[in-house]
Amino acid sequence: MVTFTNLTRAPEIGANSYLLRSGDHSVLLDAGMHPRLDGWDATPLLDQIPEDLDAILVSHAHHDHIGSLPLVTAAHLGAKVLMTSGTAALIEPLLHNSVNVMTRQRRELGRTDYPLYTHRGVDDSAVIWELANLNRPIQIDSSEFEFVLHDAGHVAGSVMTEIRTDNHRALYTGDFNLQRQTLMLPCQHPSGPFDTLIMETTRGAQAAVPGQDRAFFEEALLAGIRQTFERGGAVLIPVFAMGKTQEVLALLHHARLEGKIPKAPIYIGGLGRAMTEVYDRQRTLNPRQHGNLRLIPEAQPETFDPRRLPNLRLRGGHIYLLSSGMMTANTTSHTIARLFFPREHDSIFFVGYTDPSSPSGLLRQAGQGGAVDWGDTAAVPVRCEVRYFD
């Protein structure tokens, strides 16, 4: 019999990590870190992972699925760690960035428990990662489990994981996408039947509106950018450094080539640029559209230096693709938003999921003409345009 244990601390998007057991064998699906919690509260229930763990399978490189990976690998040196080459190329710089963030929080906020792991810990973890191919059965010598990875269509390297035993077949979707994106192709999910389905449901309670597909929202976003530019405004699009930055940058690049928006300067963050460089290097190794497109030399984004923020003067006709997507406090998108709030001709556009309790979710709820809690003693008036494109 196969048993399933949810190791997340709350039934919400956060420290994704799930344990499957069959007899004396066990496998861990992802090892994330909660984006809104701090310290050890942000990690999965690590003490419930058995010492004789056989394998760790990583679905994709977003922090809520990989943020605790160095902690798990350090405690379970005998476990195989499997992922695609695309995921491995993205994870390493993301985890090193996490160490930098935690180290800064220790210094600035007095968090003596930070960092939860070090750069050496990331390097030690990376040494034991094993690269796996799509659509090929993977056997673990010490285990009765067999795995097959299927393209999930979410971000570069993302996979659904099919888990097989002699008498059980399960599918762990991770984050997946059924629609074509600008770069990523739709997921290639395996056909059933399955005994167990473990499915990501970020948008599970959100009904699709007929006629409002991805193409509809892409055109609406481009129209919103044109309208903002026509009134002399600038556009801020809060994005995740990996995945959403590259998708939106590719969309805007093609829109400029097709004359749908002016040839406006586009700014991305330093981590966003590093992730885009990985996307460029991996462009022929992952299932995607526009396999020859190199975003850095062709879209020519400018790298935004957050040290400019204290003296920055916004200029109309500029687009800022800056992280974090949730506009977490002290991130570049959170800080620069203060410059947008008092300016009616500017716009803040959201193009992905926003946690309702995050700063981005609170800003969406406040909307233009409202006021938002931005960490000040009083709510801040929002005069800029605020819109959401699903």
Image (cartoon, grey):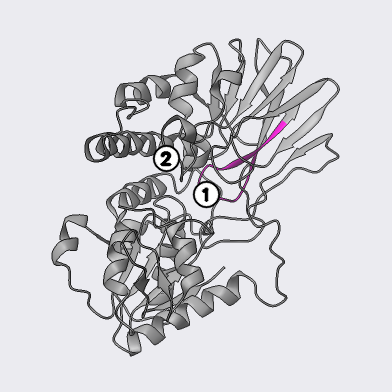
Count of residue discs = 2
Q: Residue at x 47, y 47 (%)?
A: 284
Drawn side of residue 338 relative to residue 249, left or right: left
Q: Residue 175 vs residue 345: left or right?
A: right
What amino acid is labelled 2 in the image? Answer: Leu
Q: Which residues are magenta?
A: 150-162
Residue 1 in the image: above or below residue 239: above
Q: What is the secondary structure assignment of the residue under circle 2?
A: helix
Where residue 75 sits: x, y (%)?
48, 15
The residue at 60%/69% (across/down) is: 214
Secondary structure of residue under mark 1: loop
The residue beneath circle 1 is 155
Q: CA distance from mark 2 to mark 1?
A: 10 Å
Q: Which residue is mark 2?
A: 90
Residue 60 % position (x, y): 53, 40
Viewer can see residue 266: no
Quadrant of the frame with the N terminus: top right
Kindly identify the residue that appears in the image at 56 percent across and 61 percent down: 181
Rendered image quadrant of residue 185? bottom right
Specify whether 45 is left or right of 110. Answer: right
